[in-house]
Amino acid sequence: MAFRFFPKTFNFFDLFEKQVSHAVDAACFFKEVVSRGYVSEEALSRMAAIEHQGDEVAHAIMDQLNKTFITPFDREDIYALAKQLDDVIDMINNILSRLRIYNITTVDKNLVEFTVVIEQSVRAVARAVGGLRNIKNVQVVFDACVEINRLENVGDSMRDRVLSELFANSQDPIAVIKWKDIYQDAETVLDVCEDVSHVVDSIMVKQA
């Protein structure tokens, strides 16, 4: 397995690792805010700043992709990886905004549980993306992708369980609508993390 050479003046791996570090920051901060049970304007601003930083890196990747003739792996995979990583941050930012809009002011144990799994998945994404830099990291990348897929399955089970409990126990139809949206969005973050792992898998297969 060998990656193709590309100009030393630019390194896509540096930007991908920077982008995924913003995703980790978003996941960690999301867990912190949800554990407090209240989304302040300050928290929204901080998450928006993280999302903006992620956007800037994604734009830098796309801009460089348009300027670079030789790339470390296929151009469509570079585009897909940057987009999916950006989607992870966007989804987390969207959930926090939804919590604020819905005026959620209590700690919800189910959502806290989701945030823990989301952080674990995003950290696994960081390991997978970081492993692309060196062909000796094949096992690291493989193990990270397996973990991401496992956590996505955990998220599916969690979503089904919490929605079942919500429909069975809540007497407030508005609360049902709110929490249904939030839980489904939380599980979608794990779906997007799995999408990242599929892109990484594709890159590794093509470079084999």
Image (tube, rainbow, N blue to C red):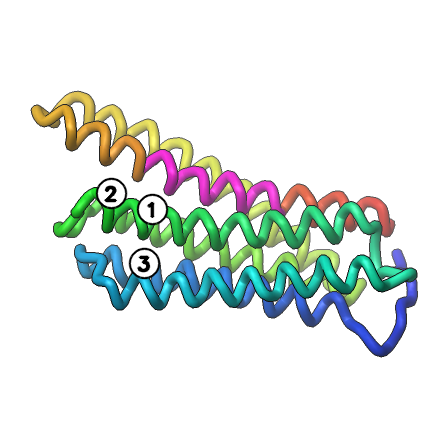
Please tell me whether residue 186 belongs to the stretch shown in magenta.
yes
Nearer-N-terminus badge (3/1): 3
Percent position of residue 207, x then y: 86, 51
Q: Are marks 3 and 1 in contact (CB under 8 Å)?
A: no
The CA span between labels 2 and 1 is: 6 Å
Percent position of residue 92, x then y: 41, 51
- The part of the chain drawn in magenta is 183-196
Q: Amino acid at mark 3?
A: Lys
The CA span between labels 3 and 2 is: 12 Å
Q: Amino acid at mark 2?
A: Asn
The CA span between labels 3 and 1 is: 9 Å
Dot 1: element: helix
Instruction: Read off the residue under disc 1.
Output: 114
Dot 3: element: helix
When the figure is inspected, residue 19 is found, relative to residue 73, above or below; the finding is below
Please report the residue visible at 63 percent of the width from the left and 59 percent of the height from the top: 58
Dot 2: element: helix
Q: Are marks 2 and 1 in contact (CB under 8 Å)?
A: yes
Quadrant showing the N terminus: bottom right
Q: Are marks 3 and 2 in contact (CB under 8 Å)?
A: no
**Closer to the camera, 33 or 208?**
33
Q: Around disc 1, counting alpha carbons within 10 Å, would you say few (fewer than 14), some (14 to 19), or many (20 or more)?
A: many
Q: Around disc 2, counting alpha carbons within 10 Å, would you say few (fewer than 14), some (14 to 19), or many (20 or more)?
A: few
Please report the residue visible at 75 percent of the width from the left and 43 percent of the height from the top: 202
**Closer to the camera, 61 or 189?**
61
Instruction: Read off the residue under disc 2.
Output: 110
Q: Amino acid at mark 1?
A: Phe
Residue that protrudes farthest toward the left in the picture: 171
Disc on res. 31:
3
Please tell me whether residue 108 belongs to the stretch shown in magenta.
no
Please report the residue visible at 63 percent of the width from the left and 57 percent of the height from the top: 128
Please report the residue visible at 32 percent of the width from the left and 58 percent of the height from the top: 31
